[in-house]
Amino acid sequence: AYRAAGGYATLTDLRATPNADAEFERVQQTLLDAGLRGLGGAGFPSGRKWGFVRAEPGPRYLAVNGDEGEPGTFKDRYYLERTPHLFLEGMLIAAWAVEAARCFIYMRDEYPAVLEILATEIAALESAGVIEPGYVELRRGAGAYICGEESAMIESIEGKRGLPRHRPPFVAQVGIFNRPTLVNNIETLLWVTRILREGPEILNTVEHNGRKGLRSYSVSGRVKTPGVYLLPAGSTITDIIAAAGGMREGHVFKAYQPGGPSSGLLPASMNDIPLDFDTLQPHGTFIGSAAVVVLSDHDRARDAALNMLRFFEDESCGQCTPCRVGCEKAVKLMQADTWDQPLLTELCTAMADASICGLGQAAPNPIRLTMKHFADEI
């Protein structure tokens, strides 16, 4: 059905081009013109990343990060259940761009329906002759949040314990089986297909609050209609709550997570910030994977923050002391009736400065922002 609607025509044309280098430069520039950035949370310009990997000596690999372990994030699952081939074509275009010898899709095991869909459709691509048998390998995760970090994911793909690597070298140089590896998120690759099919203007002409582009927001919490909403990148929490049908009956908007637990909590008074890349850093947080969780006057910020730190304590891989011990210590301190703010501040600094990867570096955000914006509760 996807092919009958014009699917895989873009991929077929790219594969048939007589001058692959010139065609890659055109594709790369189109992505840069569109402003496409990594939508798994890092936000690095996709065209530039492709160029870095292609410049490395072969063989090269492609790894798709479908772990989606950030609580409150479910946009990738939504798209894969509805338009899997839009993603698969984007993945194969990326594989063509970096001349990948093989593709690995790392998918969280908590998505059984998605795993079944992907296994079925990858087999269909092999039967149709679009890919060689075994060219795309579907790897199941085992529920480790840390494997959403790209180097830990690569360790897991290689059959080892999912622990983040020290960097440099970066995975674009030394990735899967020590070969250059392109790592992309599912939604990023889904947009690749649409941009090359419909042109860069599909993203770069949409403008709101001084920000260009579109973002998929996973919206949950105390709203009437939780779900995935495709909105302008400059949307504020006010816009997002309105798109989700407003607050539930009997609930008054109190606070929100702009990008899942790692981003911490912002108060309702900060409702005019565009939720996009680079707009939240001045406020001590970030957009991440755009997992927007809305809290109301029925919730306590200190309880939400403690819940987040318990999650990080449980999901810490244990490789580095600042994260392993820091999360455990933070949970104990946050259970007190009154928080020891000087000690928590010192602990947050140590965790953020000395942890190996983003888990330990971002885990202090819920503590810092709760102390800053909800001091009356602690």
Image (cartoon, grey):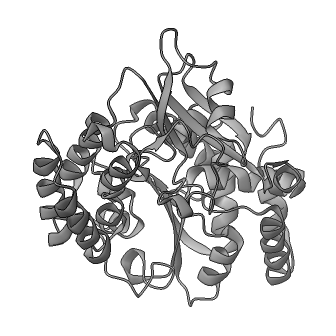
Side (left or right) of 165 relative to 44: left
Q: Position of residue 189 (x, y in %)?
A: 65, 55
Left or right of 54? Residue 309 is left
Residue 99 screen position, x and y as percent:
64, 75
Q: Residue at x 32, y 61 (%)?
A: 359
In the image, what residue occupies the spot 48% across and 16% down?
A: 251
Please indicate, yes or no, whether residue 371 appears anywhere in the rendered image. Answer: yes
Residue 110, located in which quarter of the rendered image?
top left
Q: Position of residue 20 (x, y in %)?
A: 80, 79
Out of 28 and 59, give the one closest to the viewer: 28
- Image quadrant where one finds the N terminus: top right
The residue that appears at 60% across and 63% down in the rendered structure is: 43
Above or below residue 331? Residue 94 is below
Tell me if residue 159 comes above or below residue 260 in the rendering. Answer: below
How many dots with numbers? 0
Write the residue at 58% across / 89% down: 56
Q: Quadrant of residue 356?
A: bottom left
> Is residue 119 found left or right of 277 in the rendered image?
left
Q: Residue furthest front?
A: 376
351 vs 45, left or right, is left
* 48 and 135: which is toward the camera: 48
Quadrant in which the C terminus appears = top left
Q: Percent x, y for residue 93?
A: 70, 62
Image height of 283 relative to 334, above or below: below
Q: Is residue 317 visible?
A: no
